[in-house]
Structures are given as C-alpha cells and as structure tokens.
Amino acid sequence: MNYPANEIERKWRARWREEGLFRAPDHPRKKYYVLEMYPYPSGRDLHMGHMKNYVIGDVIARLKRMEGYDVLYPMGWDSFGLPAENAAIQHGVHPEKWAEENIAGYKESLMNLGQSYDWEREIATSRPDYYRWNQWLFLLLLKRGLAYRKGGFVNWCPSCNTVLANEQVIEGKCERCHSPVTKRKLVQWFFRITAYAERLLKDLELLRDGWPPHILKQQEDWIGRSEGTEIIFPVEGKDLRISVFTTRADTLFGVTFMTVAPEWEGLDELVSRSPERARVEDYVKEALSRSEIERASTERPKTGVFTGIYALHPFTRERIPVFVGDYVLGGYGTGAVMGVPAHDQRDFEFAKKMGLPIRVVIKPLDGPEPSPETMDRAYEEPGIMVNSGEFSMLSTSEGIRRVSEALARMGLGGQTVAYRLRDWLISRQRYWGTPIPVIHCENCGIVPVPEEDLPVLLPKVEDYIPKGRSPLENSEEFMNTTCPKCKGPAKRDPDTMDTFVDSSWYYLRYPDPKNDKAIFDPAKTNAWLPVDQYIGGAEHATKHLIYARFIHKVLQDEGLVKTPEPFLRLFNQGLVLKRFFWCPVCLRVVPDAEANAHPHPTEEKLEMMSKSRGNTVPISSFTEKYGVDIGRIALLFAGPADKEMEWTEAGAEGARRFINRLWRLYQENPASKEPLPENMDQAERELYSLLQRTIKAVRDDLSRFSFNTAIARLMELVNALYAFEKKGGPVFSKALRDTILLIAPLAPHLAEELWRGWAGETESVFRKNLPEPDERYLVEETVIIPVQVNGKLRARIEVPVSTSQDEVLQRALSEENVARYLEGKEPRRVVYVPGRTLNIVV
RNA sequence: GCCCGGGUGGCGGAAUGGCAGACGCACUGGACUUAAAAUCCGGUGGCCGAAAGGCCGUGCGGGUUCAAAUCCCGCCCCGGGCACCA
C-alpha cells in the first residue's frame, strides 16, 4: 500500500490552518526569524525551481519550532515595480489587476505546498497600507539629508524607458530587458548610500560567520574601498582647480597631461572661453551617446580631445595640457585623472595615441630605469622614485606618504579614500511604483508632503505605457496640488521610486504588519529582529542585500531598530536545472517524448528551469502525482542545497520509494509506548545506538543545511528498522516513534499523519521537540580498527571501544597478514588514533 | 586580465588529515507472479586471482606527513563574480 499523499496532505493543510498552528506571537520568549526573499508574484504556475527555495525555508522553520523556538516565518509580495509592470503591459492588463490576480494565484500555489507561513502577516508592497510607509521612509531620508536631487548623466534604458541604478546595469546592459544602457542628463533623486560606505564595509565583519564568503567578497568589491591621494591642480589663467584621485602619488612627477571625463561637472566652465570649445562639445556629445558597453570596452582604442586649457603642476608649476577622454569614468573618484604614461597602461595608450611625452619617474628596485623611447608598455610595479625633485630615491610606499603630506601642507590635497560604490539613484519614470512624496512649488521650491497627508495615492491611470517620462505627468488630477507651505498652486513629483526601496525594509514590517500609525512599532519589531536566517538567490548580493543593510543602518541611527545588521545568517540556494531538447531550426523546445521523432537534429541542453526557456516542471503536475512531501525529499536529496542540481524523474523515483517504504513500515507495525527494557540484548543495543547516532546526525545536518545527508541517515535508519521488523519489541517501537519526529521537518504531512494517526497523539508533531540523543549510546560498543603497515591497509580488527593501545597492537601483530608485512622486524614507530586507526612503521 | 568557487565510480553525491566511494539512481542476479509491473533479498571502482589476497585508483606533476580526496607549490580544465575604478 502506497502513501496516499493527496488525501493526507490536503487533510493536514486544512487542519494546520484551522488550528492556527504556525501563527507567531507578538512577543516571543525564545525567538527565531526565518525569511525567504519575498517574490514578485509572477503567476500561479510555479515550478520545481521555486519549490526548492521555499521548501528550504519551511524545513528550517519547522526544525526551529521543534527545537523549542517561537518562529516567525512570514510571506509577502514584491508586487510593485518593473518586472510586474512589464509583465502586465505584455499581457495588456492593468498593473494593479495583474498584481492582485497574481498574488492570489501565487499564494494559492504556496498554500498547496503546505508551507508553514503565518499568513496573517502577509504584506504587498503595491497596496497603500504598505507604500504609505515607503513614502514615510523617503521623507525620513530627506530629513536626515540622505535623499537629494541632482542633475547629471544617469544610466538610461531605452527599452524600459527609465533610468536605472548602477546596480541594475549588468555588463552595460539593463538587468531586466538586456538592452544596452545609454546616458541621459536628468535631474533625479538619489539616496546617499556612499555616506554609509565605510560602515557597510566594516560591518561585513559581523556577518563573517553567517554569510557565504563569496557574497561577502562581492559586497566588499562592490563597495570598493581604495586608499589614495587627492591632488589639486590649479588651472592656468582661471579661478578653477582640477582635483584628481590617485593611488600612486609617487608618480606625480611623471604627469604629462590630465584627462577629465565627458560627464565631468566643471567642463562647461573650463572650456567656456577656449578656442577648442566647439570640438570639445562635439566630442562630449558623441561620447555620451555611446552605449556603456562600447565605452567600457578595453579593446577600443582610447579617444579624447585637447580642451585648449592648461593646468599647473602643484610642485613644478609646469604647464600640463588638459584633455577630455571617455576612458575616464565620470562617477569614480573626482571624474578626472592625472596622466602618467610611463606608469599607467591606460595613460600610456592615450599618450601614444595623442603623441604626448612619456616621463619615467619610477625605476625597478633591482634594475635600470626604463627608457621612454624603448618602453612598449607602462611600468606599473612599485619601485624607487627618480627625477622627482626632493622626493627622488624614496620607495613607492614612502613616496606616496611623503607626497600626500606635502600636498596637505600646501592645501592642494592629501590622503583620502575613494569608493567604487555610487549613490543610489531611486527615481523611475514609470507608473507602477511608490509616488515620490514631494511637491514642487514655484515659491517654496521642493516641499515634502506632510506626514499626515500620506499616503500620496498612486492614481489609477489608463495610459501607463512608459514613454520616457513618467506616465503620472499626464494625470492633471494627480499632478496639480497645493503647496503645503504657501497654499499656492504646485505640482507633485511625477516619478516613482525604485522597487528596491520597497524591499529594503519589508522584513521590518512583518512583526507589525497592520500598523497604521507608524512604519512599525519598535517594540514589536525589535522583539523579532534581526532575521536569524535569510534565504534567497545570490543575484541579490550587490543589490537588495546592500540596499537593505544601508536602510537598516539609517533606521538604527534614527533609533528605530537596535541591531546594526538586518540579516544574521544568509543562505543561497542553488539553481534547479532541467535537461531539454532544443531545435535550432524550429527555434523552440522539443518535448522529450517527441525528441526522437523530431524532423530536425536537436541539441540537448541543461539549463536553469525557467518559463522563458520553456523547460519547467510545474509544481502542480508533480504534486498531483506524487504529493508535496515526495517532492520535498526529491529536491533536498539531490545534492547540497547551495549547489545547483538537475531535476530528473529518476531522482524523484528514489524519493517516492523512500517515502513509501517508510509509510509501509508503519502500516505493518502497531504503535506501542512500552518502556525500554532494563537490559537490552545485543541486537537491541545496536538498534538503539544507531537511533541515537541518527538523532545526532540529523539534528547536526539539518542545522547546517545538509539536507541530503540528513535524508541519507534516515534512509539508513529505515533500512535497519526493516531488518528489525520481525523481532519487534519496545526498542523497535521507540525507534518508530522517534523516526516520525526526525522526518517531520522534511516530510511534514506524512509525519503529522503518523504522529496523530498512527501513534494516536492529540497534539501536533510540530509542538513536540526533536528527540535529544542519549549520550551513553552515541558510541558503538565495538569498533573496527584498520591496521596499516607503513601506511598501507593490511588488516581490520574488531575490538571493544575502550581497548588500550597495547592490546590493540598485540591483536594487530597476531594478524597473519600484518605479520607477513612486518617480515619479523620490530616496529620502529606505532601511531594509534583511538578508535580510528593503527599504523605500524618498520 | 584580476578575484572567488570547484574537478571523487556509468550518474547524483558522501568523507575536511585517520577504512575513499555513505545514501540513492542506473545496471545486474535471485524471490514472489501464469506473466509483467510493483515489492523484497543480494551484487556492483578498475585490473589480476578459484579463493585468500594483491596491485592501481579522488583532473595532471611535485612536496609535507606515520598517514593526503583533504594541507603546500606548479600546471590543466569547468563554473561564478568583477572588469578602463586611476
């Protein structure tokens, strides 16, 4: 008789809901907060790739409940934003309708999985009761000087018709639609995340033990702290200065030119009276129309034009020609660099192209000074300063220090730190997002919307298609308002906020999701914070996870949260891949069943399961056939949860056999609560010992996310129970009961049925604690010692655990095979690792 | 180019200095069956051997150690991140 999954699972899902079993208290005694990154609701047809993500969280939530914690395990929806809006446009449905329908569908799918969420705490970012507080947060940042408006060149996606944050540009392309990103000059809202760069970097130390190393590394690189020197070059004949950032102040005497980025702020003023002005303007225009990818290509030869302007060397007062060139990044450092062709490869290439002189000022520690005539590339290694006036003969590190000090004394710069991180551009020229709560008044300028007037409701408009400016601008009703200060006519801000603002604080709302007086009650939120275990994809390493850490620190400074970091531990689940056949002629996926009969040759591919690839296995098609618990086991047994895995029918088959084997074991044997005997016989002691070792291993494995090995241990236990079945008895019965508890986090429906059905218990298995291992039985009574002679395995001997080294050695020496390899010689050395191995060296 | 991971049977994987290949898949022998499926019991890294046992074996080459899949050095391959950051 097979496990009747559908009937049993439906029953317990309903019962758990009726009983409110997974409701989290507002004031936990011993808390554990588990959270999966909330999804943007993309529809009801979830696939096995989604399921893996949510199942991992559910196992942890149930495990922690069974370890005696009060668990907060909520779910909500990232329902505002580009992905949702693009999908709505594609389907010709209004985004609001689209979002609400998909929330309902996605929720139903998750409920059908029996996920143990506390659904009473559900949130959706596209609803006014949430985005009202998103607006409140914006005003808080404004108040704290962390939100500002700035004109300048920003990343622009010509296909999504909106600006993008730096973090949303992947290899020069839009992260959503992959169109090449260009630059546009616009006035936009920014969050001053760079003010927190140092703390964001330093506090990574607090996460050292809880986050995967590669995510920490990515954040570190993204923040990109770099110690260097600011050097100010006065401009000849003008009251202007060009400031540069360099990590190699020791090469300052090798400067033969300077280059500013096309976006450089002072450029207009710099060339205002220059004869080269028209040429510069043409160059800038062309450079900025280039796509990011093209501009960033190191393959492309360096380009630039002379500005007609000279700067003066801070030490030598030498005239230095100033160029504009697009190899200089506008957003990093000061947007201008000093050109040292002898010691920087990029400057070298630029100098060669422009026919500029090369001046050697660093020589290798152990070699002659390179000659400018024969150099074929820049000498970038550290060395000894030469031709550098008073600084000559200093080493690179000493030189950097001394030059910086001298500059500081002269008021022309000094030591400084540059970050790769840029401020966070949060304006979007799109409809489906939180309206920015400020008012533009001709008399009063920018006026924040008073808190009591929140929320600024997103109007329901018919034409929400992005056209390059916010669709809200067309809504007279929305745009026209009165200034809160002077009561005169004024306009609202037409842009909406980046959805990453919504997601940077949502985890703080779950402890107090219905609060209509405040973003949250600090008492309630601090009772649950920080999130003990966060689960989600690695793609958020430098986006959501940086933004959320930043906002958390702002709220900490405001006194609303107490911890410096929001997420104590982070787990990145690996992707679920699916093999499929692709026909390069028909340009479509060929179903497995048709692959052989297909008229064209097909390509076999193994890629991430996704709707756009057409290689998904829908959750419902699987669970209708096998049930949720078999799916859970199949996903978790396939390999380490943080590694990618291939979804196969064969793998699911193994899970099905295991669950059915387990199920039958209980159908064949009645429950019994007979006490354990005073004296167990040997077979019983062995089974009991295996049970204790399994309890320990399963607890350890689950808490370190090693689900595959936990399941393997349980399989071994079940195999042993089958071998014991005929004998039965109290030890066997005890093992059957404990096995239910051990499997419960992994196969919750099955376990609940066995617990409340088979074992006749009245209270849920998820209100019970996992068994603790009985220490006395953790070690086996006898142990098999492998005996090596000169490091090679020659025999195995079985001895009682507590046997002394001498006795073990005597036993080993009496082994025929050991004696043979000793060839009658005396052991020169004996290494005995108690209970593990014996090595005899002759 | 730079920085992280990783490479173990036919396959997914286990073992983080101490019996390599746990557990499962596939394959295979047997039991049950009129038969098949399902299920149950057994076998299964390679080579030699009737067996006992031996030799080889964790990408390649070297090293440290009584002992290396595991640590160190060099190389090859695969995956990921960053990429004109001055």
Image: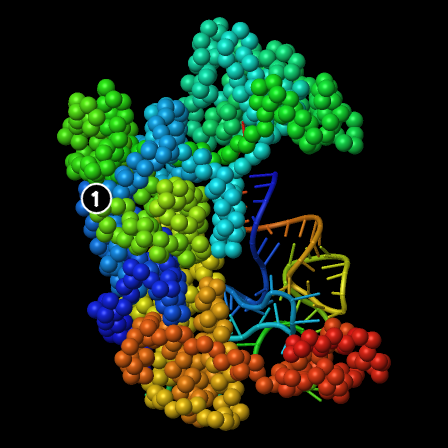
Observer able to see residue A560: yes
Viewer-closest of B22 and A321? A321
The quadrant of the image that shows the N terminus of chain A is bottom left
Q: Residue at x 48, y 64 (%)?
A: A704
Dot 1 alpha-carbon crowd within 10 angstroms: few under 14, some 14 to 19, many 20 or more: some
In the current view of this chain or complex, which residue is farthest to the right? Answer: A825
Residue that label 1 marks: A128
Q: Chain of mark 1?
A: A
Q: Residue at x 52, y 15 (%)?
A: A241
Q: Is residue A801 above or below residue A510?
A: below
Q: Is residue A59 above or below residue A445?
A: below
Q: Position of residue A160 (x, y in %)?
A: 31, 35
Q: Position of residue B70 (x, y in %)?
A: 64, 61
Viewer-closest of A360 and A418? A418
Residue A133 occupies which quadrant of the picture?
A: top left
Q: Is residue A462 above or below residue A328?
A: below
Residue A444 occupies which quadrant of the picture?
A: top left
Q: Position of residue A388 (x, y in %)?
A: 71, 20
Assign a secondary structure to mark 1: helix
Q: Residue at x 24, y 50 (%)?
A: A515
Q: Position of residue A451 (x, y in %)?
A: 23, 37
Q: Determine whether, in the image, residue A20 is placed left or right of residue A275.
A: left
Residue type at numbered disc 1: Pro
Count all numbered tags in the image, as a single digit: 1
